[in-house]
Image (tube, helix red, strand yellow):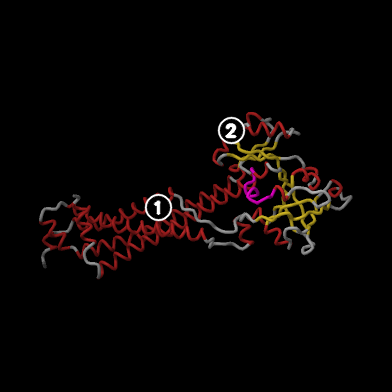
Amino acid sequence: MNVSLFLARRFLAGRKGGLLGTVSVLALFGVALGTAALVVAMGLMSGYRHELAEKLAGTNAEIIVIPAGRAEPGPTVRLLESLPHVTAVARTAFASGLLLSPAVPSGADAVVKGLDLPAGLRTTKLLGAVPGLEARLTMRPGEPVPALLGAGLAERLGVKVGAGVVLESASVSSAQGIAPPRRTLLRVAAVVETGFSEVDDSWLVVPLPLFDTLAPPDVRQGLYELKLTAPSLSDETVAAARKVLDPSSTIVDWKALNRDLFAALAVQQTLLFVVLTLIVAVAAGTIVSALVVLLAAKTRDVGVLATLGAAPQTIVRTFRFAGLFLGGAGILLGTLSGTLICLFLTAFRVIRFPPAIAKVYYLSWMPFRPEPLHLAAIAGTGMVLVLVASLFPARRAARLDPAEALRYE
């Protein structure tokens, strides 16, 4: 039996009321509150980073390839499909335009995306989740061009599924000032709400074969989207693509496109961890008060133990264990409560943003995703702080003179 561990349990399990009980409860809940705040903050940053990465990868796939010159689509697609970790390849194209509706005749800016059906539904995950999208975007003779609108864009234009809108796009003549912009009548075939403000507020998706009739001449050349088995494998695929494609081809993955953003998020998360750790450190300082009160309440017991021959190290370990019991219980309680708070906030999407703020964060609501590695780091850091806080009262107890402790007993 570990004598110090047994004594620590007996000391803490003694009198529940009075000053000792009050200070112990305050110390426990102080550590729990600081730990819970740290768990929620780390869950917030991890959830935002993960959700943002998912949305970014779900809009333009993991890798974008711009072949050199006028590459033939068929051989290029087959070549890209042979690259490692590639699960789907689709042609795509982007252009800017102005979308007009009867409710908003002045129009709203839109990003026009050409979607290669059905391959594009496998590379653009957010659009692939729309039920029956391929059938909805099928061109029918005598009808306007079918299009998919982001929910925010549709709301700004005041249109619903089945309504007609007009797309104004540039042409060679309009660029030279000879003629007005090209105007194309579209039919709203579907409206999608992804929770990603970049898509919801600005995207207009049309079938790729019809894209050439809508877009300016300088953007008619298609790009290629590559979907991978896992986003983290993009480096190997990019390296393989550069070996088989023309050196003048452009190959970028989602990491390169968003490197600065995710680097800034990593720095912000690290700084947030350091700052909130100070709160846990202050809370761990209450352990000192609890152990000092414990020493005052157990002075006679410590004197008796020293008289019976207990070594100073035994007394030191006893008060260290007592501090670890209090702090460990607070850290466990804080970790569990912080995780439950994260699950609640995510399940009910409590933190929502208005459209103006959603454009800044790219998300309409904030997810919380506590990661096991972060939870382990929080628990480990908390235990180290509690152990350091326990050193002073433990050493003070070891230096207690038995005669002084038993003088009035």
**Could you say whether the residue bearing mark 1 is in a helix, strand or loop?**
helix
Q: Residue 127 in magenta?
A: yes
Question: On the picture, is 27 further left or further right than 138?
Answer: left
Can residue 313 be seen here? The reply is no
Q: Residue furthest bottom?
A: 18
Q: Which residue is mark 1?
A: 378
Question: What type is the residue that disc 1 sits on?
Answer: Ile
Quarter residue 220 falls in = top right
| First of labels 1, 2 by sequence position | 2
Query: Residue visible at 19% across and 63% down?
Result: 298
Question: What type is the residue that disc 2 sits on?
Answer: Pro
What number is the disc on residue 294?
none
Q: Is residue 262 above or below residue 399?
A: above
Question: On the picture, is 102 further left or further right than 87?
Answer: right
Looking at the rendering, the stretch of residues picked out in magenta corresponds to 122-133
Q: Position of residue 225 (x, y in %)?
A: 66, 40
Query: Residue visible at 57% across and 36% down?
Result: 235
